[in-house]
């Protein structure tokens, strides 16, 4: 199973290591007072988000899944969140990539 490191965009420091895609996605999606839900919408499941601190209404994202079950759809959606770039949100990378980056940084010093 692939595990992830989530990097804080401001500090560059890890917010979590050795995370599942679901746990990494939760850190990304709840950053800076945001909240999220995965909702059933007929034949698909959709990712919805909102920013609680600004009392912004829920908005549908472009991430969705046509998986047959909610469990499979959630897994697909969490993976899509981890793979995407979310402006002003933490970034996820595989633990393997993060460890290689640390080795490269150490060798440059």
Image: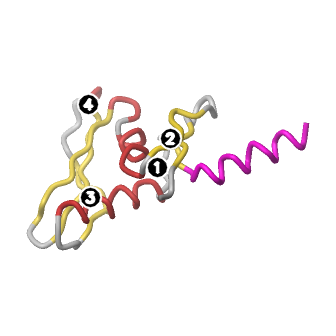
Determine the image quadrant of residue 51.
Answer: top left
Labels 3, 1: front one: 3
Secondary structure beneath dot 2 equals loop
Labels 4, 3: front one: 3
Which residue is rendered at x = 21% and y = 47% of the image?
A: 37
**Cα–Cα gap, marks 4 and 3:** 22 Å
Range shown magenta: 93-109
Which residue is rendered at x = 17% and y = 73% of the image?
A: 68
Q: Which residue is mark 3?
A: 74
Q: Nearer the viewer, residue 10 or 26?
A: 26
Q: Which mark is residue 86?
A: 1
Determine the image quadrant of residue 74.
Answer: bottom left
Label 4, residues with CA under 10 Å away: few <14, some 14-19, many ≥20: some
The majority secondary structure of the magenta stretch comes to helix
Q: Position of residue 8 (x, y in %)?
A: 55, 34
Label 3, residues with CA under 10 Å away: few <14, some 14-19, many ≥20: many
**Cα–Cα gap, marks 1 and 4:** 17 Å
Q: Residue furthest top?
A: 53
């Amino acid at each position: 199973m692939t595990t992830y490191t989530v990097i804080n965009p401001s500090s560059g420091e890890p917010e979590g290591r050795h995370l599942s895609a679901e746990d990494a996605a939760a850190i990304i999606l709840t950053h800076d007072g945001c909240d999220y839900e995965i909702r059933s919408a007929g034949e698909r499941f959709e990712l919805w988000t909102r920013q609680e601190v600004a009392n912004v209404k829920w908005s549908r994202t472009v991430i969705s899944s046509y998986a047959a079950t909610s469990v499979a759809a959630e897994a697909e959606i969490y993976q899509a969140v981890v793979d995407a770039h979310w402006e002003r949100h933490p970034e996820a990378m595989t633990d393997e990539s993060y460890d290689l980056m640390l080795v490269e940084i150490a060798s440059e010093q």
